[in-house]
Image (tube, rainbow, N blue to C red):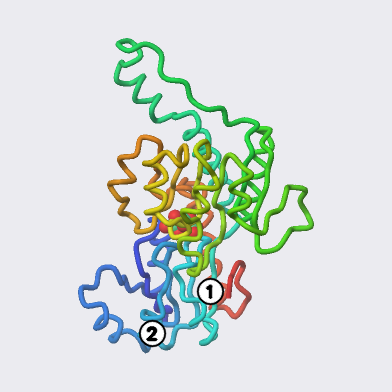
Amino acid sequence: MKPSVVLVNPIFAPTQKEFEETYVVHKLWEANDKAKFLAEISNDVRVVATDGGSGASAELLRQLPNVEVITVFGVGVDAVDLDYCKAKGIRVGNTPDVLSDDVADLAVALCLATYRQIPTGHEYAKTGQWETHGPMQLTSKFSGSRVGIFGLGRIGLVIARRLQGFDCQISYCNRNQRDDVEYKYFSDIREMAEAVDCLILAVAPTPDMAGFVSTDVLAALGPTGHIVNISRGLVIDEDALIEALAEKKIAGAGLDVFANEPTIPEALRSQPNVVLQPHVASGTVQTRTAMGKLMLKNLSNFLNGDELVAFVA
Ligand code: 8YV
């Protein structure tokens, strides 16, 4: 008999198709009465499949007491209740490494787009303003700037490597100093923000990091400072960010992630000095294909009694 899987939300279509061919897939997002839906299948379900945004809450997992493994389409597991999983011995597989190149590419793209105001230039050229109003206003140079990476993990390291090509002076802030890099280390994000021009958030967040980038950190970054976030929206206090942008306490922001996706507050959307992306850092066909393969491999390994290829619990 095919194993039963609760799929929390739709995922990359080819991966979902393979799930549907291999397993009995119960689509949670389609159920109107989720509690009833889960109660009817809970005895059979050993597997939850989900993505980085939806994860798996303790409330969901309590309704599926026979779950043994969660397989996540994404590297971020902040939306999975890891304390609950550890307490119950539930394994959690994710998809690191295969997405680092794309996420780092988007981080660099957001730096360039924000400093050089690429969307503004695009609009300016497209709408004929160049012809009617003359040359566009000047922007800011990115190459050679001082960049602080909050979270020098797998993705952060790839970003740092790319930024060396832009002659950036790289600093990082982690819980612990790494002994395999020469970049300047800060144990305190506020101190790092004060010392850099551009703050890039690449941390693998935990729920307790909510609002970590606060009014204070943004003030330390200062009126010529830029912030780029490819981590999770929760890491920035979004109201503080909106205020800092509106009052020009920082120069600009490049954001791929938001506190309450897919909703982006109007006050943020209407800021002229932000470049927004709809959480697409890993969103290329190539990377999503690789993530899907890894997600499926994690699960087949688990069900065959082998070790998961990539896991956090
Ligand atoms: C995905 C992500 O956008 O890996 C992550 O943690 O946030 C992304 O790669 C998401 O999980 C796919 O829907």
Q: Earlier in the sequence, mark 1 or mark 2?
A: 2
> Is 97 displayed left or right of 28 in the figure?
right
Q: In terms of image quadrants, where is residue 48?
A: bottom left
Residue drawn where x is 26% and y is 82% of the image: 35
> Is 49 displayed left or right of 29 in the figure?
right
At mark 1, the secondary structure is strand
Let me know if residue 292 appears in the view: no
> Is 266 displayed left or right of 134 in the figure?
left
Residue drawn where x is 55% and y is 61% of the image: 204
In the rendered structure, which amino acid carries the disc numbered 1? Val
> How far from the left and from the top, in percent, is residue 53?
41, 62
The answer to whether mark 1 and mark 2 are in CB contact below 8 A is no
> How far from the left and from the top, in percent, is residue 153?
64, 57
Q: Is residue 26 above or below residue 154?
A: below
Badge number at residue 92: 1
Inter-mark Cα distance, 1 to 2: 15 Å
Let me know if residue 158 appears in the view: yes
Question: What residue is pinned by disc 2?
Answer: 64
At label 1, counting other C-alpha atoms closer than 10 Å, the crowd grade (few under 14, some 14-19, many 20 or more) is many
At label 2, counting other C-alpha atoms closer than 10 Å, the crowd grade (few under 14, some 14-19, many 20 or more) is many
Residue drawn where x is 52% and y is 72% of the image: 299
